[in-house]
Image: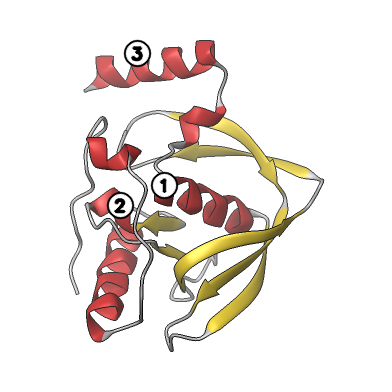
Amino acid sequence: MTVRTCLPWPDKRLRSMAEDVAEITDEIRAIWDDMIDTMEAMSGVGLAAPQIGVMLRLAVVDGSTERGRAVRLANPEVLHSSIELREHEEASPNLPGVSAKVKRPRAVTVKYLNEQGMIDRRDFVGIEATSVQHQIDHLNGRMYFDRLSKVKRDMLLRKAKKQG
């Protein structure tokens, strides 16, 4: 298991659609292990494979306080979203030093392939709902700041550039 380097924004892979995972293999499980190590090294609550340059639809989410409860997802897809929204301060290791408040559904039901290669469904609520939606955005070539108004997005990117 290894902590991987996150791609720096504006690497074009962060704007690319990740490819579906055909089956869960030992290689996929090893990528998930590295993703969990990487997420935990930065005290994050989730990570998508494209963030570390792996262009596959893989994500990990762990919103637990004690850690070690990461959900491993391949080809995640939101089936249902709550009407109620939740605002949360989001950030990304691909663009360190900045963050922004983003509103997303408070709860989502997600379908995905689990570690055994079986189709699974799970309800995510609160921080884990925010995280899984954030990761799915990454798998679709979107960044959290794409959900901001143009003015707020431009301000955030200018601030990031000054810090970099």
Residue at 32% x, 21% y is 160
Q: CA distance from mark 1 to mark 2?
A: 7 Å
Q: Are marks 3 and 2 in contact (CB under 8 Å)?
A: no
Residue 62 appearing in the image: no
Q: Quarter-wise, where is residue 97 in the image? A: top left
Residue drawn where x is 75% and y is 42% of the image:
85
Residue sitting farthest toward the bottom = 116
Tell me which amino acid carries mark 3: Arg
Contact between marks 1 and 2 (CB within 8 A): the answer is: yes
Between 111 and 90, the one lying in front of the other is: 111
As drawn, is 112 to the left or to the right of 52? right
Image-based side of 60 in relation to 30, left or right: right
Closer-to-camera residue (158/40): 158
Q: Which residue is at the front of the view, 78 or 148? A: 78
Tell me if mark 3 has few (under 14), some (14-19) or many (20+) residues whose alpha carbon lies within 10 angstroms of its own.
few
The image position of residue 149, as x and y in percent, is: 57, 18
Could you tell me how far apart the alpha carbons at marks 1 and 3 are, in whole angstroms?
Answer: 21 Å
Residue type, label 1: His
Question: Which mark is on residue 138?
Answer: 1
Q: Tell me which residue sits at (52%, 10%) in the image.
A: 151
Q: Quadrant of the N terminus?
A: bottom left
Among the two numbered marks 1 and 2 on one chain, the one whose residue lies closer to the N terminus: 2
Q: Is residue 149 above or below residue 86?
A: above
Give the spatial CA distance, label 3 vs label 2.
23 Å
Quarter containing the C terminus: top left
Label placed on residue 50? 2
Residue highlighted by disc 3: 158
